[in-house]
Image: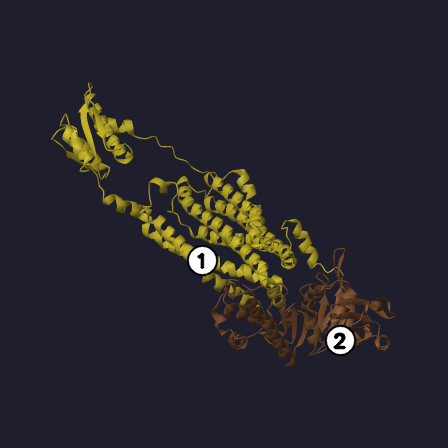
């Protein structure tokens, strides 16, 4: 057991200290902090450039209701009456004094029309704000013309309410679903990247030891099976280190910015309902998914003789992860779909699909438990099989590296007595 | 402490890599394995180390089977050299020694001694990929002996080294042997085996074709070499009774003869024929025996 810890700590320590690990961790953390502060960052840049727009009001009646309207919508556009004439106004826009020129007028029906001139027409934002503001002004003017009262107008524009009610008890409401989606989405990404990244790391590690032939010394001191699992656990601890850092920083960062993360995009991908159970499930499925794919990667890595062949060897495994991720992404919009339910019991897909379902739906407890049980059994089976292949595989050197070698590797460990 | 192989065979499917090998290697001995590539040397070593299970027969060390429990007393230098290219010499040798049950501080101290001995103390903090191939080999050798094993297995320890380094390494190996370590080593350099081993085994296609102590093997081989340098024509000896082989050299001939008595007869015959500058009777070299037994040369 002693050797087991030596290998484990050696694997962990030598990886933690590598530049690539430090750099990727810092980069990922920066991205997490950046994303969760997105609203602040955008706000920061926008504050500095609150735009001034020159207005030429031909009727001198439209500007003030429009300004009122913009104030109501919290717009940062500043409208300034410009009296020196259209030619000069255009010049001022060209010189950058104003970001645009708005010419207001009324048509035959005495309703507002406008022309907006700016250096380019790519600035959609201020255009949209101006347009919707004017729309309101126009509606009011038209209502006045036909003598509608405010109440009548309000009744006309009131939206129809369609409430969705799930009959199943404890079922998540539409609002809750939307709130859960953001978290599940992010955690799915984390599981996906982590599984691919760390499984790759293991396969590379094994292939490096094999191709540099240090393997022969290693397995003459420690049994290959002990060595394989110590390595898997060592890298597993590494991944947990990174995951905990990531979740911790992400959690606090999101908590800090929760107020600003409402409405718009976040109304569908919300973080409002950061439930503890979802995070616990994420960690469970992350760990199980890691072990499943790490074991697979370790024995696939043991079959190649050269590092160049690793990618080719683990491609089928990567495709499995990608397929699971695709299904989960699809399921995010439609978590009730029957085939999502069925495929979530296939061990290679369980880590992502079952997690997605647990996070999005209110499943009876036996479903995730059954999924976890199936996953555990397949990990154990794969570990037993993988260990046997590994034991023979690490001694095998040849030009070809194909799945036929699995049979050869198994044959080497057999002691036909 | 005896390393014993009893009727050991290893088959991979229908291919027999080692066939019925029985060897006993006494303590503090140096035992040489000779054989062509694919003769079964490495497979034998792997069975001794327990990396492969023998299909038939037993390998025992001191009457006990060799398992991972005994790994701290075994040192191994694989034929294919390899260390972690990116790790510092210090880090990986201490790691490998710890896996063989050595304490960290002790391993570091011992490593410094060895580096001083090979006059390369500055390698301690270098990465292995920065070292030349020959120096990597020295580090690899240190990795095999750092934990002071009782049984040391060296697979082709001298291949790829320059003569100076070969001498250095030979000295180190002999010293380790003096300190009581049993050493098994394979080589295709006959002179190394001849110089260093008391006992040896020549393997051919998984079978031991010659096996025993060097002296006995030479005696049993019977044949001797006779070198004659003379001013007159010696080609007539090619068909002389008792001469098995003849090679012409610029100064005379090298004969392989069946025994001393043939040399006596030849001496009588050539006296009076002319001036003989040289007449030497030699023990057969291991190379001669090897070529004769295996039928292929390696040098």
Task: Tell me where residue B258 sits by quadrant.
Answer: bottom right
Asked if labels 1 and 2 touch by Cβ distance under 8 angstroms, the answer is: no
Q: Report x, y in % for residue B284.
A: 77, 73
Q: From the image, which quarter does the C terminus of chain A lie in?
A: bottom right
Which of these two is toward me, A377 or A215? A215
Which color was chain B given? brown
The answer for which chain carries disc 1 is A
Describe the element under mark 2 as helix, strand or loop.
Answer: helix
Residue occupying the far bottom of the picture: B179
Q: In the picture provided, is B281 more to the left or to the right than A230?
A: right
Query: On the rendered structure, is B127 left or right of A142?
Result: right
Q: In this view, which residue lies farthest toward the left?
A: A84
Image quadrant assignment for residue B233: bottom right
Residue B213 visible in the picture: yes
Q: Colour of chain A?
A: yellow
- What is the number of the mark on residue B214? 2
Q: Residue at x 69, y 67 (%)?
A: B188
According to the picture, the residue beneath numbered tag 1 turns out to be A21
For disc 1, the neighbor class at 10 Å (few under 14, some 14 to 19, many from 20) is some
Secondary structure under tag 1 reads: helix
Evaluate whether residue B6 shows in this view.
no
């Amino acid at each position: 057991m002693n050797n087991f810890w030596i290998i484990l700590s050696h694997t962990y320590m030598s990886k933690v200290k590598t530049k690539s690990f430090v750099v990727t961790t810092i980069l990922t953390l920066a991205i997490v902090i950046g994303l969760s502060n997105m609203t602040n960052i955008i706000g920061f840049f926008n504050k500095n450039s609150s735009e001034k727009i020159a207005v030429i009001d031909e009727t001198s009646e439209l500007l003030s209701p429009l300004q009122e309207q913009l104030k109501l919508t919290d717009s940062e556009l500043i409208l300034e009456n410009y009296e020196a004439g259209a030619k000069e106004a255009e010049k001022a826009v060209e010189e950058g004094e104003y970001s645009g020129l708005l010419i207001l007028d009324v048509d035959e029906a005495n309703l507002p029309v406008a022309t907006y001139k700016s250096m380019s027409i790519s600035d959609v934002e201020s255009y949209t704000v101006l347009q919707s503001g004017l729309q309101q002004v126009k509606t009011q003017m038209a209502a006045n013309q036909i003598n509608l009262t405010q109440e009548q107008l309000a009744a006309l524009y009131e939206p129809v309410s369609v409430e969705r009610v799930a009959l199943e008890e404890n079922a998540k409401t539409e609002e809750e679903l939307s709130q859960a989606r953001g978290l599940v989405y992010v955690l799915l990404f984390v599981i996906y990247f982590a599984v691919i990244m760390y499984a790759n790391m293991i396969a590379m590690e094994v292939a490096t030891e094999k191709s540099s032939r240090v393997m022969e010394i290693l397995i003459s001191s420690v049994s290959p099976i002990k060595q394989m699992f110590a390595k898997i656990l060592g890298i597993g601890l590494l991944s947990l280190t990174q995951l905990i850092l990531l979740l911790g920083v992400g959690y606090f960062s999101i908590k800090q910015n929760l107020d600003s993360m409402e409405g718009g995009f976040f109304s569908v991908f919300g973080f409002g309902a950061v439930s503890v159970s979802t995070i616990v499930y994420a960690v469970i499925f992350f760990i199980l998914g890691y072990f499943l794919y790490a074991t697979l990667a370790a024995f696939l890595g043991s079959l190649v003789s050269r590092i160049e062949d690793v990618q080719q060897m683990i491609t089928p495994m990567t495709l499995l992860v990608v397929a699971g991720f695709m299904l989960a992404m699809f399921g995010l919009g439609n978590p009730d779909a029957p085939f999502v339910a069925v495929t979530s019991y296939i061990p290679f897909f369980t880590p992502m699909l079952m997690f997605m379902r647990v996070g999005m739906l209110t499943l009876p407890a036996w479903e995730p438990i059954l999924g976890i049980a199936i996953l555990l059994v397949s990990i154990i089976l794969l570990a037993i099989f993988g260990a046997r292949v590994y034991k023979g595989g690490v001694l095998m050197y040849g030009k070809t590296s194909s799945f036929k070698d699995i049979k050869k590797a198994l044959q080497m460990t057999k002691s036909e007595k | 402490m005896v390393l014993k192989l009893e009727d050991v065979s290893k088959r991979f499917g229908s291919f027999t890599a080692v066939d019925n090998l029985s060897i006993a290697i006494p303590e503090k001995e140096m035992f040489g394995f000779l054989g062509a590539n694919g003769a079964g040397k490495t497979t034998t070593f792997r069975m001794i180390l327990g990396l492969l299970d023998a299909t038939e027969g037993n390998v025992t060390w001191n009457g006990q089977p060799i398992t991972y429990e005994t790994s701290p007393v075994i040192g191994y230098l694989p034929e294919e050299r390899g260390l972690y290219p990116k790790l510092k010499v210090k880090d990986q040798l201490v790691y490998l020694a710890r896996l063989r049950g050595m304490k960290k501080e002790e391993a570091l101290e011992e490593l410094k001694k060895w580096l001083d001995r090979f006059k390369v103390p500055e390698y301690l903090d270098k990465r292995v990929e920065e070292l030349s191939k020959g120096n990597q080999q020295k580090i690899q050798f240190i990795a095999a002996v750092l934990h002071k094993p009782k049984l040391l297995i060296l697979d082709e320890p001298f291949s790829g080294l320059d003569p100076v380094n070969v001498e250095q390494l030979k000295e180190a190996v002999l010293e380790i042997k003096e300190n009581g370590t049993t050493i098994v080593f394979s080589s295709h350099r006959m002179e190394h085996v001849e110089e260093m081993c008391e006992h040896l085994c020549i393997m051919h296609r998984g079978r031991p074709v010659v096996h025993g102590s060097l002296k006995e093997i030479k005696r049993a081989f019977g044949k001797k070499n006779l070198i004659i340098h003379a001013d007159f024509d010696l080609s007539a000896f090619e068909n002389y009774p008792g001469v098995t082989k003849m090679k012409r050299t610029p100064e005379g001939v090298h004969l392989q003869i069946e025994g001393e008595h043939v040399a006596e007869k030849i001496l009588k015959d050539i006296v009076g024929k002319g001036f003989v500058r040289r007449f030497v009777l030699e023990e057969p070299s291991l190379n001669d025996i090897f070529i004769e037994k295996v039928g292929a040369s390696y040098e």
